[in-house]
Image (spheres, helix red, strand yellow):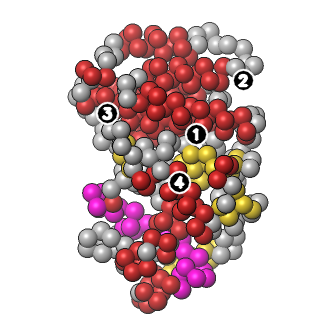
Amino acid sequence: MIRLWHSGSPGEVSDSEVAFAFASGRLAYDCARCGAKCCRGYGYAASSTGELAYQLSVSPHLALFVDGSISHSTRQLHVLNSPSGCCFLQENGMCGVQVRGGYGVKPETCRLFPFNDLLRLGRFLIVRPHVGLCPIDVVQTDGHAPASLYATLLAELGLKGVQAQVPHCRDIGTEPDILVENEGRITTESEKYFSAADVMGYLASQDAIWEAQSRRVAPNMSTAAMVALCADLLSTPPAEKLGHDADLLRTFIAVTPALRSRLILRSVSAPDAPQFASVNVCDAGRALLTLYLIVSLPRFDGRVSDRPYAASCNCSSYAAGLM
């Protein structure tokens, strides 16, 4: 069970009520290779009770970096750090708190990152990868990354519960149980199309999964027809002939569940926060097809992004606006 301490409706979420917007073990990250960017200048949240007390016992001068303001909703303090690095960041890129006390004593922000973009949808807890700050990789082989295995993440979420505020999703007009079931099937399907790097087939399958649930009048051109047309225009060769491009296509497939989640699910924002419309579940495949075409264009003139997930997320609002 996962205890949500400050989510607007505190309570417990069972493991079966946690929905991941990515396939188990498919996403990876390498802190040493990226230079621990998340530990440089961004700070973190620490509970005002035991968590911060332990950190101060390890490094008393941390008190100089504790923001005096406290979140009364979560009882958490913001701990600042300099652009050169957190005071716990060691030269080898390891966390001093983790080295001394183990993974479980790390601040919640750091312990769950980069899989700490959490949302409440009815009785469900949606877990998504963080956008932008972490250069998330996609495991391109048949292996899996231990850090993103469902069992690993469930254990970490359940270790101390979640102290941070978990926002609720806006009402999207679809029953949470139905949405979680169908989007879960789409996530499972991603592994089926992954090896073949068959983006077009995967996009068509998403439309088919939701077709039985939809009562909406069919558009002039179905997603499947749009996929077929674009596949013909792009003349995509088989995966074995794509070389490095196959890795890019697999990356798009692997992050599609997270992209769908960002298009469909929007949190209940503060009154002064920017408001973005969500995409209807039946239009998400069409939006992703548009997005795929946008991020694929650099492949045809020799420019390739090394951050396809971040690039895709940055395009998602634009793609939604084209619907």
Which element type, helix, strand or loop, lies under badge 2?
Answer: loop
The answer to the question of whether label 4 and label 1 lie on touching residues, with beta carbons closer than 8 A, is no
Label 1–label 2 contact, CB within 8 A: no
Whichever of labels 4 and 1 marks the residue nearer the N terminus, that label is 4
* Disc 1: which residue: 261
- Mark 4 or mark 2: name the one nearer the start of the chain: 4
Which badge, 1 or 2, is on the more N-terminal residue? 2
Q: Are marks 4 and 3 in contact (CB under 8 Å)?
A: no
Q: Residues within 10 Å of mark 2 (few under 14, many from 20)?
A: few
Q: Tell me the element at label 3.
A: helix
State which mark lies toward you, 4 or 1: 4
Q: Which residues are magenta?
A: 32-53
Kind of element beneath mark 4: helix
Q: Amino acid at mark 1?
A: Ser
Question: Which disc number belongs to residue 323?
Answer: none
Vertical side of 245 occupied by 234: above or below = above
Residue matched to label 3: 247
Q: Is residue 14 above or below residue 250?
A: below
Residue designated by label 2: 213
The quarter of the image holding the C terminus is top right
Taking 56 as reference, is 303 left or right?
A: left
Q: Residue placed at 72% from the left, 60% from the top? A: 12
- Magenta residue check for 68: no
Kind of residue at disc 4: Ala
